[in-house]
């Protein structure tokens, strides 16, 4: 029965998508399923043969509960902790669901208004014997699948639920749960976007893993646990990006003064005697040690790459392109000092290129002795630095001769 009704709902949805004038087909299909399944269960007494049904429900509204609110007693602390955790989960789920449908329908969601609405809703609900609630994914999916476009659908749904609770609740006593599950599944199936998932796979494999964690977590565990898993994996990715920033080796594009990533621009070439690196992240306590080790590893790889070439022109300068380093902290300043000292011990000069304002100011404050940031080691562009330093090498060579 569940599979049959699921197929019927999916076919009705497909018909409405192919022929927009028949939008009422997908909107009426869930109601038809509920009525037909309820009649079949009642007619064949299926509840006595293993069918799970809703069962008998009371025909009344929840009683007022504002007189039961207590702001004292031994359970107040536990209630506050539980309310805080539940509130965070409800807000996360509600905003995530809202943004999901906003991306499908091309409209904006204001997170502040969503939080105010969820908070006000639960304040009113706590005064009328309601449990904590939020913008449920399953209910939103059913609403979307029925063709709802505005918030007026919630008003109609509320009135319908009120009338149902007060007058026709006994009619749903024999409604099988499997049909309610089929309605939810049919609505959720319409939200699965295979081309978008494939696009995410092509763009970023890690984002695809985050998407799978959220998807299977919501499907097999719960919305809360699925979102928690996805957020945890995303935070792990961010921490990895912060603690392991990207450094790339730059080369010169022939016929220009432009320097680009050697991995992306195959025609770019290395400049003998120069190791040109680009640091593509802010430098702070979380990544300064890693960057120090990574730069030294670049030097070792440079020297071991082609011994014959380096025997002719050994490494003289390490140029750090700093245009994407937006800020540094005290550990970042120490990183430059330690790196400069290490370079001097190796007979290599450290050169900084295209420092942004904040980075320049902090390095200048730390250069009280005047031996750290020399004017001849600071340049605006990599091309200018290579041209100036190459001329210096040539002049030194001619003087030696």
Image (cartoon, helix red, strand yellow):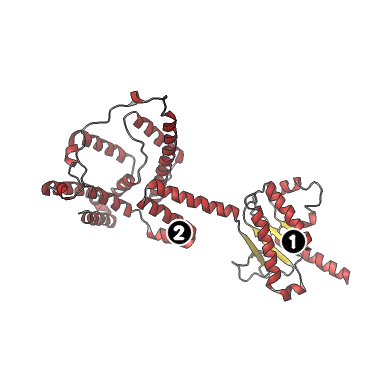
- The residue identified by callout 2 is 200
Vertically, is 297 above or below 219? below
> Which numbered dot is residue 385?
1
Q: Is residue 53 left or right of residue 128?
A: left
Q: Position of residue 307 (x, y in %)?
A: 72, 74
Q: Position of residue 263 (x, y in %)?
A: 60, 67
Vertically, is 131 above or below 143? above
Residue positioned 42% across, 36% down in the render: 82
Residue lying at the far bottom in this picture: please name it: 308
Q: Earlier in the sequence, mark 1 or mark 2?
A: 2
- Asked whether residue 126 appears in the rendered view, the answer is yes
Q: CA–CA distance between discs 1 and 2?
A: 40 Å
Q: Is residue 163 left or right of residue 86?
A: left
Toward the viewer: 45 or 198?
Answer: 45
Q: Quarter holding the C terminus?
A: bottom right
Q: Quadrant of residue 294?
A: bottom right
Toward the viewer: 49 or 5?
Answer: 49
Secondary-structure class at tag 1: helix
Q: Position of residue 132 (x, y in %)?
A: 36, 36
Secondary-structure class at tag 2: helix
């Amino acid at each position: 029965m569940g599979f049959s009704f699921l197929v019927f709902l999916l076919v009705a949805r497909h018909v409405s998508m192919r022929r927009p004038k028949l939008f009422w087909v997908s909107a009426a299909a869930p109601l038809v399923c509920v009525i037909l399944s309820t009649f079949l269960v009642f007619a064949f007494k299926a509840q006595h043969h293993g069918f799970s049904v809703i069962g008998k429900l009371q025909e009344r509204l929840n009683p007022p509960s504002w007189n039961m609110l207590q702001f004292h007693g031994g359970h107040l602390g536990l209630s506050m902790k539980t309310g805080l955790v539940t509130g965070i989960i409800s807000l996360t789920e509600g905003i995530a669901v809202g943004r999901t449908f906003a991306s499908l329908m091309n409209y904006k969601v204001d997170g502040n208004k969503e939080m105010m609405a969820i908070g006000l809703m639960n304040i009113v609900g706590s005064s009328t014997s309601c449990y904590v609630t939020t913008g449920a994914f399953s209910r939103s999916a059913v609403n979307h699948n029925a063709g709802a476009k505005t918030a007026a659908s919630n008003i109609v749904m509320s009135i319908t639920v009120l009338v149902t609770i007060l007058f026709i609740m006994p009619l749903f006593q024999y409604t099988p749960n499997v049909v309610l599950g089929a309605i939810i599944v049919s609505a959720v199936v319409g939200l699965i976007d295979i081309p978008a998932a494939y696009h995410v796979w092509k763009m970023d494999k890690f984002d695809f893993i985050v998407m799978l964690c959220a998807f299977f977590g919501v499907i097999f565990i719960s919305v809360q646990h699925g979102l928690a898993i996805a957020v945890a994996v995303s935070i792990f990715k961010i921490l990895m990006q912060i603690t392991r920033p990207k450094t790339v080796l730059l080369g010169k594009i022939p016929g220009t003064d432009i320097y680009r990533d050697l991995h992306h621009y195959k025609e770019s070439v290395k400049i003998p005697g120069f190791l040109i690196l680009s640091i593509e992240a802010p430098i702070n306590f979380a990544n300064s040690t890693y960057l120090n080790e990574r730069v030294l590893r670049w030097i070792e790889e440079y020297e071991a790459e082609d011994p014959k070439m380096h025997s002719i022109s050994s490494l003289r300068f390490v140029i750090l392109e700093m245009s994407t380093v937006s800020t540094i902290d005290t550990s970042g300043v120490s990183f430059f000092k330690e790196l400069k000292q290490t370079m001097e011990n190796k007979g290599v000069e450290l050169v900084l290129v295209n420092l942004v304002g904040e980075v320049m100011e902090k390095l200048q404050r730390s250069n009280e002795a005047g031996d750290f940031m020399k004017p001849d080691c600071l340049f605006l562009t990599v091309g200018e630095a290579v041209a100036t330093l190459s001329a210096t090498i040539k002049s030194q060579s001619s003087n030696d001769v």
